[in-house]
Amino acid sequence: MIETMIEPTRHKDYRDLCRYAASASLIGLIALSIAWEAALAPLRPGGSLLMLKALPLLLPLFGILRGKRYTYQWASMFVLFYFTEGVVRAWSDKGLSQMLAGVEVALSVVFFISAIYYAKFTAPSRQR
């Protein structure tokens, strides 16, 4: 009896944690993409147009911040492009760019896991 009373609260706490982690990691990916290619370690001196890779990350941003379950579902697959880019550049680049690629991989993994679990905790079968 006590477990059934605690369970909804536990899911709400996990859901909120996943929402905050997904929001923070997505905003972090946007900031990293812009800073990386504009100033920190651009492909060309003075910055490169590769910083425009941050634009597609703006598509799910408002849905993620508002807690839209459907956005979490499709954005979890969408972020895998950034994971792939990070892995490739961590393997092929050197120096600061390689470290930034590692950060990109970490942020995309955090977002992916958070988005998957947020979708799980907000499933209609879990709502009471």
Image: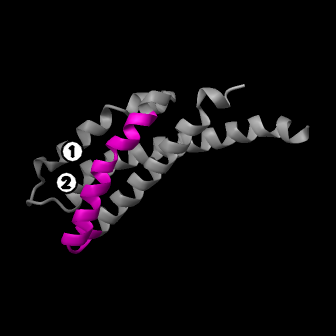
Residue ID for mark 1: 53
Of residue 12 and residue 124, the one placed in the foreground of this image is 124
Query: In the rendered structure, which disc, 2 or 1, sits on the residue that comes first in sequence?
Result: 2
In space, the residues marked 2 and 1 are separated at their CA atoms by 9 Å
Which residue is located at x 66 percent, y 31 percent? 126
- Tell me whether the residue at label 2 lies in contact with that at label 1, contact meaning CB atoms closer than 8 angstroms: yes
Which mark is nearer the camera, 2 or 1?
1
Local secondary structure at mark 2: helix
Q: Residue at x 38, y 38 (%)?
A: 75
* Magenta segment: 72-98
Q: Which mark is residue 72?
A: none
Residue 48 in the image, given as x and y percentages of width and height: 11, 52
Quadrant of image for the N terminus: top right
Q: How many marks?
A: 2
Mark 2 packing: few (<14 Cα in 10 Å), some, or many (20+)? many
Rendered position, 43 above or below 117:
below
Q: Amino acid at mark 1?
A: Lys
Which residue is depicted at the point 35% across and 49% down? 29
* Residue under label 2: 37
Q: Secondary structure at mark 1?
A: helix
Q: Is residue 16 left or right of residue 8?
A: left
Above or below, comparing residue 30 to residue 65 in the picture: below
Is the magenta region chiefly helix, strand or loop? helix
Residue 60 lies, in percent from the top left, at 36, 32
Count neighbours of disc 1 (C-alpha within 10 A) and say few if under 14, some if 14 to 19, many if 20 or more: some
